Amino acid sequence: MEPRPLVPVYPFAEAENDIELYRGPAKLCAEEITEVVLKLSMRRKVEIAWEVTVGDHNFSLEDGELEIDHPDYGPCVLPVRLHNGAGLGRVDPVELGNQCPMTRVTCHWANLPQILPGQPLTKDGVGWWRGRWTATANNWRFTIDSRPDISETLRARQRSGEDFVITHTGELTTADGRSFAPDEAADVLFAIQLALSFALGRWVAPCCPVGFDERGERVFEQWAPWRCDPWRGNFHWWYEHRDEDLSEFVSRFVCAFLDESTRAATRHLAVHAISANHGTTTTEGRLMLAQAGLEYLAWIDLVATGRYTKQGFRELGAAGKLRLLLNGASITTTIPPELDALQTLSATRSGGAWDGPTALVWVRNRLVHPKSPAEPYEIEQLVWQSTQLQLEYLELLLLHRLRYERSYLRRYPPGGWPTPIPVPWAAS
C-alpha cells in the first residue's frame, strides 16, 4: 500500500490562489475590528496580506500593530503596513508561538515543478500518483509531497498565466527523532530553499512553516514575505525527471551550508548563479554577475587557501584564473561547437586559437571598455552565448565543489534537445 501524502496545515487554495490563515476579531491602533482576514497572498508576490472585511474604517496610512487572539498561540501582535485606509495591507515578518523544542515542521512550497519519477502516494486509498521526494543531510530528513491535483494545478497555471502557485507540502524532521529549536529549523529550511532554487535557476519558497512538539501540538509559526520568483521558463541544470540526482545534490548542498567552513562560499556562489539566471536580468547583467561569482570562487580557492600569493594571483590574469579552476574540475576549456558566435570571435581574433576563458574575458572587457560602442555586438548572439557559457562554468564549478557526481543538463545541447549527461569529473 502506497503511503498517504503529507497533510498541509492550511488546505490548498481552490480559488484565487490565496490561503486563509486567520479570520476573526482584531484590534488595530487601539480600534476594535469585528472581522479581519489574514491570508497567504499569491498575487504580485508571496506574502501575508490582511484585510478588514466588516465595518467602515478610515485608518491612518502608517505602520501599525494588528492584535489578534490566535486559537493556537493566544494573543499575538503583528507588525503591519497599511496600503489602504479602509483596512488593507501586509504583515511584516513575525513569529507566532514560542521557542519550544519541535519534532517536525510542516510548510507549503511555492512554484516547485513535478519532481519525477517520485515515490507513489495515495489519498483515501483511491488512486495514486508519483508525488514524494525525499533527501537527508547530516541528521536532517526532508520530505516534499506534491498536491494530489498537481497536474491539473500546473495546467491551470499555464492557462491563467499566474506567477505563483502552491504546489507541494513539505516536512522537516530529524532522522533520530531529536527535537530542535525554531532557529535551527529556519536555518535548514533556508538551506533547502537555496539548494532547490539553484537546481531550478529561480527562487522557490517554503511558506508558512508550522512547528509541532512531541505531543503533536502547534508551538511555532512564521508569517513573512518569502523570496520567490515568478514561474517562467528559466533554464536549469537539473533534469526534472531525475529525482535521485536532486536528492544527492540537495544532501551535499545542505551539508556544505551547515558546515561553517564551507557555508559562506556555498551560499554566495549559489546566490550569484540564481541571480545571474533571473529572467528579468539583462544579458549583460547576467554576464557580469556570473563573472563576479567566478572571481569570488577563484579568490577563495586560490588565494584564501594559500595556493597563490596575491601577486601570483594577479599575474594569472582573469582568463588564467578561470582556466585553472576549470582544469581542476576536468571541465573542458574548448569553446563548444554549438556556440557559433564565440567560435566566430575566436576565428576572427586569433585564427581559432582562443579557448572559452580567453573569449569570455575579451567579451566582458569589451562590454565595459569597448573601442567602439558597437564592438561587443558586432557578432550576432555573441553576448548571449557568452552568458550561457559563463553560467555553465559557474554552475559546474559549484557542483564540483560540492562533490556532486551525477548528471546535469548542458545549456547548449547538441541538436537543441536537453539530455542529461554525467558531470565531467565523474566521467574522468
Image: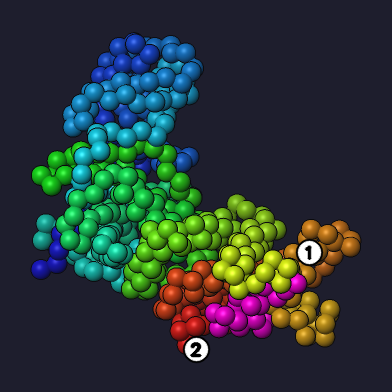
Hey, which residue is sitting farthest right in the picture?
A: 372
**Residue 45 spot, x, y in % from top left:** 46, 41
**Residue located at (21% from left, 30% from top):** 73
Vertical position of residue 174 compared to residue 96: above or below: below
Going by the numbered disc 2, the residue's amino acid type is: Ser
The residue that appears at 82% across and 67% down in the rendered structure is 378
Residue that mark 1 sits on? 365
Q: How many marks?
A: 2
Label 2: element kind: loop
Residue 313's disc is none
Which residue does the numbered mark 2 point to in the structure image? 428
User: In this picture, is 350 found above or below 149?
Assistant: below
Residue 198 drawn at (x, y percent): 47, 61
Question: Looking at the rendering, which quadrant does residue 360 occupy?
Answer: bottom right
Decide: few, some or many residues near mark 1? Use Cα within 10 Å; few <14, some 14-19, many ≥20.
few
Verify whether residue 69 appears in magenta.
Answer: no
Q: Nearer the viewer, residue 408 or 163?
A: 408
